[in-house]
Amino acid sequence: MASDFVEEDGVGRQTLTPAAVLFPIVRRPQRPTVLLTQRTAHLRDHAGQISFPGGRVEAEDLSPVHTALRETEEEIGLPRERVDILGFLPEYRTGTGFRVTPVVALVEPPFELHPDPFEVAEVFEVPLDFLLDPANHQQQEMHYRGAMRRYYAMPYGDYFIWGATAGMIRSLSERLGLHASVPCGIVAL
């Protein structure tokens, strides 16, 4: 079964577009949450999907942290002063041609968000314990680029968290020792 999970989808590493996302864990008094976005339906890449704020590395970005913070400010208006960088998860290579560096951070409330209506349809929070619970990690499959692909999904209410976002959440869960890792990773569409 582990061999059914692919992380790179046959795309050569040199052809992948570098990107970074912020994995924002919000310190809520009741319990920590994760800030996620739903992308607008008209976007070229990952339209309508649930995602972390982030995007392509630009020439002026000095590091994945700079990319993640810049993109987060542009997409949802989260001020970087509210963000405390904790570290990184391993690069996540997607089947759609991106090499993504997940930047894990704590976000300190209060903050006011100003989503960019061109890129972001909605911003919402999901309890961190829900996302890290292996019981909520579903394995699903679909035909993609001529082959059957497996991926993780974490449905939450009306939100369908899947693909790269679910894979990065699963990566954090594995690093915290909440379950065994899948050696070959997964495809992110």
Image: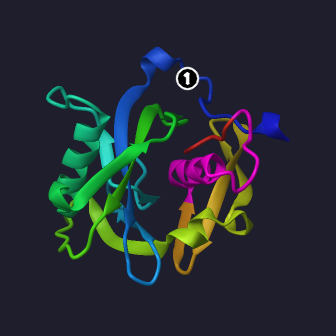
For residue 66, side relative to residue 129 (left or right): left
Q: In the figure, residue 38 lies in which quadrant?
A: bottom left
For residue 135, side relative to residue 13 (left or right): right
Residue visible at 52% across and 37% down? 94
The N terminus: image quadrant: top right
Q: In the figure, residue 25 lies in which quadrant?
A: bottom left
Estimate the x, y position of residue 140 in percent, counting from the top left. 73, 56
Q: Which residue is mark 1?
A: 11
Classify 130 as above or below 42.
below
Classify 123 as above or below 142.
below
Residue visible at 55% across and 23% down? 11
Classify 177 as above or below 18.
below
For residue 46, side relative to residue 82 (left or right): right
Kind of residue sitting beneath label 1: Val
Q: How is the image coloured?
A: rainbow
Magenta-drawn stretch contains 167: yes
Magenta-drawn stretch contains 101: no
Kindly give the residue lying farthest to the right in the view shown. Answer: 1
Q: Residues within 10 Å of mark 1 (few under 14, many from 20)?
A: some
Region in magenta? 162-184
Q: Is residue 30 visible?
A: yes
Classify 46 as above or below 114.
above
Residue visible at 44% across and 84% down? 30
Estimate the x, y position of residue 125 in percent, counting from the top left. 41, 74
The C terminus: image quadrant: top right
Residue visible at 55% across and 81% down? 157
Q: Nearer the viewer, residue 116 or 101?
A: 101
Q: Is residue 103 visible?
A: no
For the image shown, how many numbered marks are present on the structure? 1
Estimate the x, y position of residue 4 in percent, counting from the top left. 78, 38
